[in-house]
Amino acid sequence: MSEESPPTTDEESRPPGAAGGSYTWLIPIVTVVVVVGAVVVGLVIQSDLPAPDEIPEAPEELPTGEELYVRHCTQCHGRDGLGVARRYPPLVDTDWVLRDDERLILVTLYGLRGPIEVRGERYDDVMPGFSRHLSNEEAAILLTYIRTSWGNDGDEISADDVAAVRERYPPPDDPWTMERLDER
């Protein structure tokens, strides 16, 4: 009778120095590659944006107000302009949209940090500004769309109106607040 040798495991059958079944050594390398990639992508995106005080050029073919609204506003204010309860205010039938053109332009260009009150409800969130994304013409088209949609009966905002606000108020370091808007 011959003596049988015990079965060998994968570890025992590998030559000395061969990589094991664990790839934990890859985790730090993959982490570094992902972080460096994210930084590079961020820098590329940032380099495509105009400087804070540089006004973007209008595209040759201007989008419609609805296209601009869908692109920049629907995530927070909804397709119907009714906002999200206790989070993002409505744009329908509100003094914020219909009464003070300059305030509306300032908030759109440079953002707003709460708390604010809209139609009797308190909102305390942050709205980003779009001064680096919208030309004067695009901002005017977008704001006119908001002021004339969903039953709103506001007047048109012109590219000259937007340009005048940009000229009068340079980009702030932080979004506007209700207090700063009241003080202007």
Image: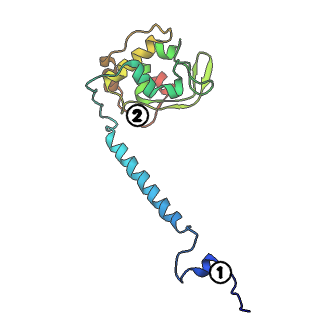
**Vertical comparison of 16 with 172: above or below:** below
Where is residue 7, by image quadrant?
bottom right
Where is residue 167, by image quadrant?
top left
Q: CA distance from mark 1 to mark 2?
A: 70 Å
| Residue identifier under label 1 | 8
| Residue identifier under label 2 | 172
Q: Is residue 101 visible?
A: no
In the image shown, does 24 or 3 lie closer to the viewer?
Answer: 3
Circle 2 SS class: loop
Furthest-right residue in view? Answer: 1
In the image shown, does 122 or 87 lie closer to the viewer?
Answer: 87
Mark 1 touches mark 2? (CB < 8 Å): no
Residue 27 % position (x, y): 53, 63
Sequence-wise, which precedes: disc 1 or disc 2? 1
**Vertical comparison of 28 with 100: above or below:** below
Which quarter shows the C terminus?
top left
Residue 153 horizontal side relative to residue 3, left or right: left
In this rendering, the count of numbered labels is: 2
Furthest-front residue in view? Answer: 1
Residue in the picture at 62% in, 20% down: 121
Residue 58 % position (x, y): 28, 26
Local packing at callout 1 (Cα closer than 10 Å; few below 14, some 14-19, many 20+) is few
Where is residue 171, by image quadrant?
top left
Label 1 is placed on what type of residue?
Answer: Thr
Query: Which numbered disc, 1 or 2, marks the residue closer to the eye?
Result: 1
Label 2 is placed on what type of residue?
Answer: Pro
Disc assigned to residue 138: none
Residue in the picture at 56% in, 80% down: 14
Q: Is residue 157 visible?
A: yes
Which quarter shows the N terminus?
bottom right
Residue in the picture at 72% in, 91% down: 3
